[in-house]
Image: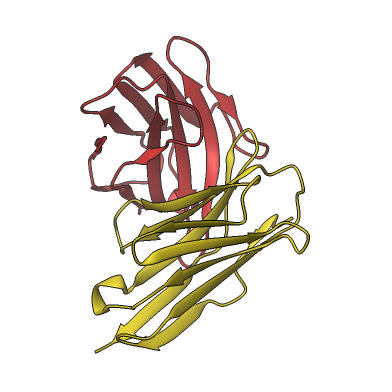
Amino acid sequence: GAVVSQHPSWVICKSGTSVKIECRSLDFQATTMFWYRQFPKQSLMLMATSNEGSKATYEQGVEKDKFLINHASLTLSTLTVTSAHPEDSSFYICSASDQGLTEQYFGPGTRLTVT
Amino acid sequence: DQQVKQNSPSLSVQEGRISILNCDYTNSMFDYFLWYKKYPAEGPTFLISISSIKDKNEDGRFTVFLNKSAKHLSLHIVPSQPGDSAVYFCAASYGKLTFGQGTILTVHP
């Protein structure tokens, strides 16, 4: 099946710094990539949708200047959390699709802890 | 506004018995429904899906039922195995995926 990787799997950073998370589709071309966030014991919340070569579409309430998303190629999307604060600590998961929303393949997730 | 709800945060089942996970939704525009399985610190894994034009889809031990009039879907796992222990999320699609809160399934040997 289709494989999606994320790097890093776990990161600790200091408040005020920026962190970049990579999401890669390893064996298929992802025309669309999605970024989700999950708080403990809560559901996955869609943050933004990105299509290769165009600007990401952010969900209501998600600050686009804080969560920078770049989808520069058909196999790579990055999420940069700028000026991170402790409340940004969460589990960030990406997914990728090449056939529309009914076929989404999820990455393993990245645990971000901001101290 | 929680458009997809899984009202049972946890479910405990004996090995070999049936596990029934439930999910309710409010948006009648949803046209595709999916179930995902998730282990701690990992991304979700797709299990099974169903289109809104169907009322049942079966794949091995997993069967998903859709009741559109009640805006309810359920996932049946028969027989349940200890390896099925995980968090199960239902998701509904209309332009994007909306997830429920998840149900922790524990299958006891």
**Residue at screen point 47% across, 43% down:** A36
Where's residue A90, x and y in %?
42, 53
Q: Which quadrant holds the N terminus of chain B?
A: bottom right
Where's residue A63, x and y in %?
59, 33
Chain letter for the red part:
A
Horizontal side, residue A92 vs residue B91: left or right: left
Number of callouts in the render? 0
> Quadrant of the rendered structure where residue A77 is?
top left
Q: Which quadrant holds the C terminus of chain B?
A: bottom left
Where's residue A82, x and y in %?
43, 32
A41 in relation to A93, above or below: below
Q: A64 and A32: which one is in front?
A: A32
> Quadrant of the rendered structure where residue A105 is?
top left
Q: B78 and A67: which one is in front?
A: B78
A17 in relation to A41, above or below: above
Horizontal side, residue B35 vs residue A62: left or right: left
**Residue at screen point 53% across, 76% down:** B9
Where's residue A93, x and y in %?
38, 44
Q: B42 and A12: which one is in front?
A: B42
**Residue at screen point 53% across, 15% down:** A55
Q: B69 and B1: which one is in front?
A: B69
**Residue at screen point 49% across, 23% down:** A50
Chain letter for the yellow part:
B
How is the model colour-coded?
A: by chain
